Image (spheres, helix red, strand yellow):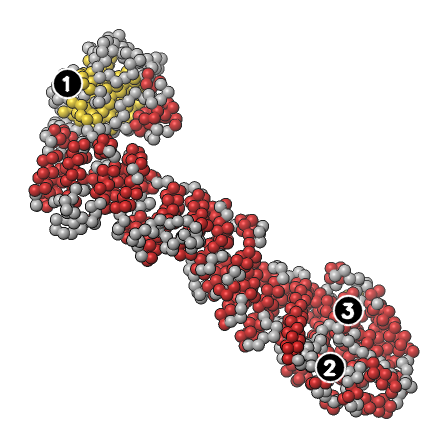
Amino acid sequence: MRKSERNLLASIDAQIYGIALELLNRIDDDVVADLLVDILTVLTSLTINVNELKILLHYLKTENRIWKKHAVKLLNIFKNLPYRYGPDEFFNFPGRNGSGIVLPPIKLWPYQNGFTISTWFCIDPVANGVIEKEKPYLYWFCNSKGHGYTAHFVGNCLVISYSKLKEKTFQHCIQFEFKPREWYMITFTHLYQRWSKSSIHCYINGQLVSNTFFPWSIESADLFDKCYIGCTPDRNDLTSFSGQLSTFYLFSTYLEPSIVQGLYKLGPAYKSQFKFENESAHVLNDSQRRAMYDGKLMNSIVFNYNPVACEEKLVLQAAPKTNVSYFVHTAHAQMLSNVRSVITYSIYSTLHSVGGIQVFFPLFGQLDHQQTDGSINYNVCSILLSTLCELIERSYTIQHQMLNSKGFLAIGYHLEKVQMRLYTYLATEFVAYSEIYHLLQPISEIIQTLHTIKYFYWVVDPSHRSGFKPKGSDGHRPTREQVIEMRRYMLLYLKQLVISSSGTQEEELQAILNYLHTVHEDDNLVDVLDTTVNLMSEYPRAMVPAFDRRQGLKTVFKLLASSSEITRLQALKLLGFFLQRSTVKRKTDAMQPHNLFSLLADRLLLHPNSFTMATYNVLFEILVEKVSGLLVEKRTSEITPDWKIENPAMIKVIATLLRHASDNIHQYDIKLRFLDDLILLASASRDNRRTILQMSVWQDYLFGLAYVYPTQEIQIEITDRVFDLLKILLHHAIKFEYGGWRVWIDTLSILHGRITKEDYYRKVNQMVENMKDNDEDESRTPTGSQSPVDEQSISTPTSKDTTKLITESINNPDNQIFCANVVHIISQMADVLCNASGGLLPLLASATSASHEIELLEYTEGLSPKDALRVLKRVMGLSDLFILGSTANFSELEQEKSMPSGGILRQCLRLTMTTAVRNCMECRFQKFDSSKLPTLSPSAAKGAHKDPLETILELTYLMNTSEAENESEDENDDISLLIASFIKNPESVLQELDIQRLRAIIYRDVVRQDRTKSNKGVVVVVDDTKQSQFLALAIVYFASVLMVSRYRDIIETNQTNLSRQTSTISATPSSRQVSTSDVTVDTNSLNDSTTINDTNHVSVLLIKLYFV
């Protein structure tokens, strides 16, 4: 039966189908049952009519929930039902004597426009046939003289022949092997040329396999009265065709290759007249449809013989009646003996006759029915589903029947209790088959899947928050764990649909975003959100542009308002993957127009107490765009030099969250982790430091993490980390960045403002507490007092380089940016330090007063005299190195600061004179023993102003401390080691260091050492003497004032001075608590006989005039 179609037809004629089913129900032997099932399978592969299908379904119906014998084996028939090759109707040629189809005589052969012969055939060789002797003919179209066109088989090859005269015969062998029991479409197109060679093109299955030319054509007025299909005029068994033949066409024109391909696409079952386009709607393309259905092909049909248009042995002509008739009389052909028209019934036509695909649905209700031995066969469901899939794939009619009969809903009802592995199949293997995928519409399937998850597979009842009425709440529902697992498999299926679809996936992503927008329960959306994050991370090339165009950021910010931390973290992950895989332009266009980074902080502040380490880790991943797929409390990857700050605005977001979070041990850990990460990033990469420095008011974010007045050890540790990071950034700014000095100035300004604000709040709080306690003592923070933060900013050490000489490093071209920034800072601090130290002119007047009278010294810059002198000492050391020891020209710096020419040197001169005046004051007061001064009680110190004399003595005490004490106090101060020692000769008017500084100021722009020469003694004279003359004049005036004051002191009586000083020291504490004006009057009363020398007074006025 498998080897011969004739045997199979003989079995069908014997009606053994019903007999085999009856035997199957009685047989207990499995081997015999398997053979019977094979017989039924082979029979149904050729044909299954309505009665046979009814018998089969009746046998498959269970009785008392028990399957009949071997019924499950019989289900295997369904596996082969969808697979069908060849037409449902065909002519069967047995290959015996007298078998064939004879055509009526043709009065004129249509050769002028060419002609085409086309048909489908299947070779079914006769058993025990002699191949060497057999010469079966496919067709024979000749006249009575034997002239015409023939085609015959020689073995498995086909030979076409053209004969005009007995001595003129043309043959061409087609180089193609025709296999038995397979259907082929053969097409011969003849192109007639009157003045050149004619040609023949041979097509097999729509493809050109051979072409040839022949020098002449058959032009005869004789009748073609010997026309046969499947035999010759002899009609013997050696020349008779053995096999099956479908519709046979003869066209009176040469067919183009595209039309031949269209004929092949229509298939072996096509037998119409090419009249209606709808019959080829799903098969042909537009160009082929226009060429085949424009009417020309229909009008060129000479004859059309198909196995349906038959009446007993008569084969009716099926060509259009309006076509030109080429026959002498009637065009109907006749089947000879043993040739018959066979009509079979495929499963598709039979299902259409019995009502459609829904006849299979009751079988799904028997899935849990038992076998005769009490067991359950779980393969029944897979067999039925695979059969349905194959039928749906191969028939548009079945597809419409499934939709119209709500077949999927019916199957879903029967599969209410299914194995979990079916969901696994749906998620992994279902979409993997290309045949199945081509039948699916991804966007429609995605929408339906999300609709099912939303309305049926919900975890938490969505009617309370989301506002829609769910389905499936009546009756028994699966457990929460089962629903979550089923949702997981359905989302895997959805993911396969998204990644398998072609295009930009915008519609697919839009459907997912719509779900996330309309569902508000965290349990109902977290797994869908997780799937979206996975899609974004695994397929960024398609998902990121779609996410941008569909405005997915709106969904992210909607999810950030959720009360669930898991939802917020996944939303942040989604944002992170989008930013990580986006171009710079896409990120800028998406985030900056609406300042979304600030909105991100506002969204997260809706839950201020839920800022955890996991949230910080995700935000830090967005900062450096190293987003991972896991939610972890502790990051495992270490920061490396290749980590870059890609989204610096995230620093502000994290700092804002930390500032608004309440202080607790967890927040302290996050702050330390954040500061450590920033320190590592800044230390590892120069670009990272530059990125932070380019941020607006980045200092405010850092100072917001520090504690101005820390009360715990961990707060002190956090503050130390802030200043460690500040040191790294300020060092980079001043050394590598043009205009880096502005960063220092801004930093000090912001720090001063934060400390002042904190002091004000502390003062207000203290006043409120005092008012509550009815305390008469007023508690306040003294003007100019310092917080620990301020002290740490002053004592922050600066790194040093001991491998070279300092002066060589300063004049190195590589360090010019650093030197320029330091000079800018010195210039910015010069006037401030002079005022903080008491002012140059008030100090000079006090140092040169004949009566040793001390004017009122006001420290207006918020620094105590001790701190002012400490900073002045450092700045003077820097000035010696970077101004006096440098060969750079300051004209550009002065133009940048809008200063007149020489302004920086004049500022340096004021600093030098201030230092020199303090040295003079020390020389005058160094004989006092400050330890013998009376000490004010704390209660008295609260309301009393400090005596100017006591202030001077404090400064004298500071400058008289030993070098060991200075080293211990400034043990971390490296620059101070470069500054000259303190007073060496108290008897001198000016110390040696002060004289060297004044001399260097005069000669800096006049005589400059040429450091480019190998000989260090070579100097260059610069033609800029005017500025140096001004500086020299001021220095001369300054020195003359001090010299005149010293001459006066020598001439006057030392005893008078000593007695006046002793009376001042021995004053009672109560007298020191008077106002400053009282002290001044008392001093004048003691020195009424002494006045300032006129020359001294004139010199002071000259110096004032110069600096003004």
Amino acid type, residue under disc 2 in the picture = Gly
Q: Residue 238, position in %: x, y?
A: 13, 22
Please report whichever mark, 2 or 3, sits nearer to the chain's N-terminal start: 3
Residue 784: where, in percent of width, then height? 70, 75
Between the C-alphas of marks 3 and 1, the distance is 128 Å
Q: Looking at the image, is 432 positioned above or below residue 916? A: above
Q: Which residue is mark 3?
A: 907
Foreground residue among 358 and 424? 358
Q: CA distance from mark 1 to mark 2?
A: 139 Å
Q: Amino acid at mark 3?
A: Gln
Instruction: Please determine whether, in this image, residue 256 is positioned above or below residue 20.
Output: above
Report if residue 732 is visible in the image. no
**Badge 2 is on which residue?**
943
Q: Are marks 2 and 3 in contact (CB under 8 Å)?
A: no
Residue at the (73%, 81%) spot, across then down: 943
Could you tell whether 261 is left or right of 163 in the image? right
Q: Is residue 754 left or right of residue 1100?
A: left
Which element carries disc 1, helix, strand or loop? loop
Whether residue 667 appears in this view of the structure is yes
Residue 336, numbered circle:
1
Say if mark 1 contacts mark 2, CB within 8 Å: no
In front: mark 3 or mark 1? 1
Q: Nearer the viewer, mark 2 or mark 3?
A: 2
1053 or 76: which is nearer to us?
Answer: 76
Residue under the point 54% across and 77% down: 713
Q: Mark 3 or mark 1: name the one nearer the start of the chain.
A: 1
